[in-house]
Image (spheres, helix red, strand yellow):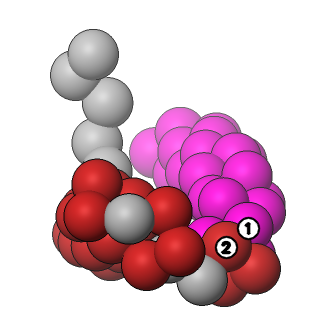
Amino acid sequence: MGAPVSTTHVVSSAIMGVGAAKRLKGVRWNIARQIVIAWFITIPSSALVSIIIYNILKFFA
C-alpha cells in the first residue's frame, strides 16, 4: 500500500505470525492484543503530530 511502517511493528507482527502458524497457543494473545491496541494509538498519533509540525513549519517558512 506504500504506507511507511516502523521496524518494530513489522518485527512484532512477524513474530506473532510465526507463532500462530506453528500453533495458536504459541502466541500470548493478551500481549498480541496490547500490541494491536498500541498500533491503533501510535499510528494515528504520529500522523497527528506530523500534521501539526508540518503546519507550524509551513506557517513560519
| Bounds of the magenta segment | 32-61
What is the tally of numbered marks visible in this picture?
2
Q: Quadrant of residue 1?
A: top left
Q: Residue 17: within the magenta?
A: no
Q: Is residue 12 left or right of residue 44?
A: left
Above or below, 51 against 53 in this view is above
Q: Looking at numbered disc 1 in the image, what kind of residue is underneath it?
A: Arg
Q: Position of residue 21 (x, y in %)?
A: 28, 54
Q: Looking at numbered disc 2 in the image, what kind of residue is underneath it?
A: Trp
Residue drawn at (49%, 63%), measured in percent from left and top? 24
In this view, the mark in front (2 or 1): 2
Give the camera-side residue of 15 and 53: 15
Query: Looking at the image, can residue 20 be seen?
Result: yes
Question: Which residue lies under the disc numbered 1?
Answer: 33
Residue drawn at (43%, 78%), measured in percent from left and top? 26
**Neighbours of disc 1 within 10 Å: few (<14), some (14-19), many (20+):** few
Residue drawn at (38%, 65%), measured in percent from left and top? 23
Helix, strand or loop at label 1? It is helix
Q: CA distance from mark 2 to mark 1?
A: 6 Å
Question: Which residue lies under the disc numbered 2?
Answer: 29
Q: Is residue 10 left or right of residue 36?
A: left
Q: Quadrant of residue 31?
A: bottom right
Q: Are marks 2 and 1 in contact (CB under 8 Å)?
A: yes
Label drawn at residue 5: none
Query: Looking at the image, can residue 6 be seen?
Result: no
Give the camera-side residue of 59 and 39: 39
Helix, strand or loop at label 2? It is helix
